[in-house]
Image (spheres, grey):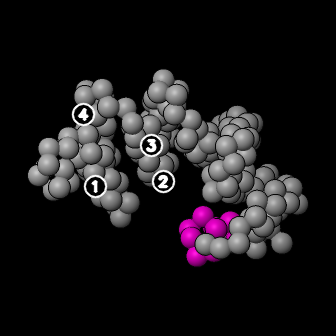
């Protein structure tokens, strides 16, 4: 942020401020972090800089999901989808579909719709050959299936994706997948 200020790099500064908001929100300053992110996302949009906006809207959605604010999470996610589609930037569509599924699971009223979103996330990640996003989607879908009593299908799905990885087993996503696999035995 300081280097951006020094060199007059406004767009990059806004991205840095979004990251600062994320850093505030993660350890518990949730509203302060979300407010800062929203302010900077709006500033980027006002400058007609849409690169990265969908990503930070996705991050905001992730935080809102963590704190259980389903309506605001779905609204943020709707914006993320709109920006990604309008800018023809499909990089995070699998993650957005996964987050929609997670929010719908949390809402509890639409399990079929949640499962459809998680399956969509898997399909997109596979089409893009995005193994990390595929792992996240498979973990979320396996968790839903576990809740529904479909442990065998959950284990098969998750094991097939998890088995692709040969390194990085200390990362959060792989640790979470391994913990779920162990629970599905």
- Residue 179 lies, with reference to residue 141, above or below; the image says below
Q: Calculate the distance from the C-alpha at mark 2 to the C-alpha at mark 4.
A: 25 Å
Q: Calculate the distance from the C-alpha at mark 4 to the C-alpha at mark 1.
A: 15 Å
Do the residues under discs 2 and 4 have CB atoms within 8 angstroms? no
Q: Secondary structure at mark 1?
A: helix
Q: Residue at x 86, y 55 (%)?
A: 153
Q: Which residues are magenta?
A: 169-178
- Residue 134 lies, with reference to residue 35, above or below; the image says below
Q: Residue at x 14, y 49 (%)?
A: 7
Q: Secondary structure at mark 3?
A: helix
Q: Quadrant of residue 160?
A: bottom right
What's the mark number on residue 94? none
Q: Earlier in the sequence, mark 3 or mark 1?
A: 1
Query: Marks 2 and 4: which is nearer the front?
Result: 4
Q: Mark 2 — residue? A: 66
Q: Calculate the distance from the C-alpha at mark 4 to the C-alpha at mark 3.
A: 15 Å
Q: Residue at x 48, y 49 (%)?
A: 62
Q: Mark 3 — residue? A: 55
Query: In x, y percent, where is residue 45?
Result: 30, 29
Please state if 103 lies on the left or on the right of 57 as rendered.
right
What's the mark number on residue 20? 1
Q: Residue at x 28, y 55 (%)?
A: 20
* Residue 123 in view in this figure: yes
* Residue at far right of view: 152
Q: Secondary structure at mark 2?
A: helix
What's the mark number on residue 43? 4
Please state if 142 lies on the left or on the right of 107 as rendered.
right
Q: Earlier in the sequence, mark 2 or mark 4?
A: 4
Q: Earlier in the sequence, mark 4 or mark 1?
A: 1
């Amino acid at each position: 942020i300081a280097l951006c200020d020094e060199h007059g790099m406004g767009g990059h500064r806004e991205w840095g401020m979004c990251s600062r908001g994320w850093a505030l929100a993660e350890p518990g300053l949730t509203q302060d972090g979300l407010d800062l992110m929203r302010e900077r996302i709006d500033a980027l949009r006002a400058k007609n800089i849409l690169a990265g906006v969908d990503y930070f809207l996705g991050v905001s959605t992730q935080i809102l999901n963590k704190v259980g604010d389903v309506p605001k999470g779905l609204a943020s996610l709707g914006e993320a989808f709109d920006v990604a589609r309008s800018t023809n930037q499909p990089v995070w569509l699998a993650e957005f579909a996964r987050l929609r599924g997670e929010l719908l699971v949390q809402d509890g009223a639409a399990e079929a719709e949640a499962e459809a979103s998680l399956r969509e996330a898997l399909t997109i990640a596979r089409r893009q050959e995005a193994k990390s996003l595929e792992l996240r989607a498979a973990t979320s879908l396996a968790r839903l299936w576990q809740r529904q009593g479909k442990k065998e299908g959950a284990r098969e799905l998750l094991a097939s994706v998890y088995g692709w990885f040969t390194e990085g087993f200390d990362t959060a996503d792989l640790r979470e997948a391994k913990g779920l696999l162990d629970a599905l035995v």
